[in-house]
Amino acid sequence: MDFNFSDDQQQLRDAVAKWVEKSYDFERRQKIEAEGGFSREAWSGLAELGLGGLYIPEADGGLGMSPIEGMVVMEELGRGIVLEPLAQSLIAGAVLAGHADAATKERWLPGIASGEALVVLAHQEKKARYRLDVCAATAAKAGDAYTVSGTKSLAPAGDQADAFIVPAQLDGRIALFLVARAEDGVAARGYGTQDGSRAAEVVFDKAAATLLAADGLAVLEHAVDIGIAATCAEGVGVMEKTLALTVEYLNTRKQFGVLIGSFQALRHRVADMKMQLELARSMSYYASLKLNAPAAERRQAMARAKYQLGVSLRFVGQQSVQMHGGIGVTDEYVGSHYFRKLTQMEMAYGDTLHQLGEVSARMEETAGVFA
């Protein structure tokens, strides 16, 4: 199998890398974090590159690209630990393009592609513990329309979003709805998260909603799988930069009059970090390549990829901090921000223990050995 990127994919990577380098340095990121963890100006910068429309068909104002382009973009954003939740636009673009009616597509997809509209997935509930089939929010028919009631937690940039993709119980099963934040009965309380980004608790009280899918669980699983693939790719970028910062520090810091990078024990630990990075990279490729596979195959692939990512994230982050010493956890040093990001990503869309359970549950007679 050829894992070389095409010229167009490499050009896309270069364009995003240049934007991160020139427009999203550490000083700007610190400023955005201090101001709440989300910048509309930075969001517009990403939109100017066309990134919001990666998974939106060209007929709806997007670029109509594949998961491989999404992976390339998320890796570069990971290197810059960009706070703005581009993965949410990938999720929203794919879900609306695949399931919304014509009027809803016309209203929302061009805005998502241009960056004028931020639509995020608001699916997490306090009692669900990563399970997508646990949903206490409810929906009701209201004439020819619907209303949604319930509370969702950790909605990315939820108090800045223009609309939410929301799962809710309808007639005994989970359906998926689109709810605009401007609707009556929607209240969002924003707060900062561990990695410096922004999330919100969102309360829906008989808020007007548009039905996206009556069989919402299957669509929700696909939406979360898009998020997992994006997180895997982003994690690779974060780990690459973390490794580079660690190597730079080892080749600068002196102890007993010599560079600590000359110590064999530390060199071995760096080699182990590199191995974990490459294991995560291979599983990120695997996740992106399986993103459009049949549901059972796709879900199994995402659990495997996210499990390996979690193991690698934890190892790389912890080794980096240990080799840096005290400076590795100071807020003034950029490395601590990469560590915070790695720690939070390990828990996103199901932590490592949860994903190990998912891998186990999907093993068949071969126990996964030949699967």
Image: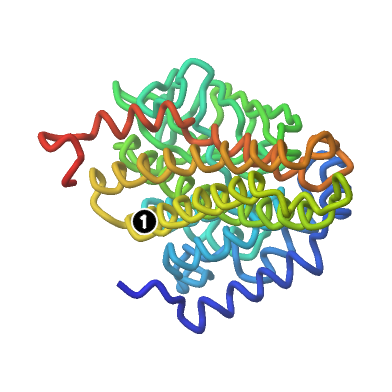
Instruction: State whether residue 136 is above or below residue 51.
Output: above
- Can you give x and y, in whole percent of width and height, for residue 248 in the image? 76, 57
Q: Position of residue 136 (x, y in %)?
A: 44, 18
Picture quadrant where residue 217 is located: top left
Residue at x 59% of width, y 72% of height: 13
Identify which residue, 136 or 85, lies in the foreground: 85
Q: Which residue is mark 1?
A: 286
- Residue type at tag 1: Tyr
In the displayed orientation, state which residue is furthest to the left.
365
10 Å neighbourhood of mark 1: few (<14), some, or many (≥20)?
Answer: some
Q: Is residue 9 visible?
A: yes
Task: Please tell me which residue is depicted at 24% across the width and 47% down the height of the picture.
Answer: 297
Residue shown at 42%/22% (left/top)?
135
Q: Position of residue 164 (x, y in %)?
A: 56, 40
In the image, 224 versus 162, the foreground residue is 224
Is residue 304 or residue 205 the one in the foreground?
A: 304
Looking at the image, residue 234 sits to the left or right of residue 16; the answer is: left
Query: For this view, does 359 lie left or right of residue 242?
Result: left
Residue ID at (42%, 57%) = 282
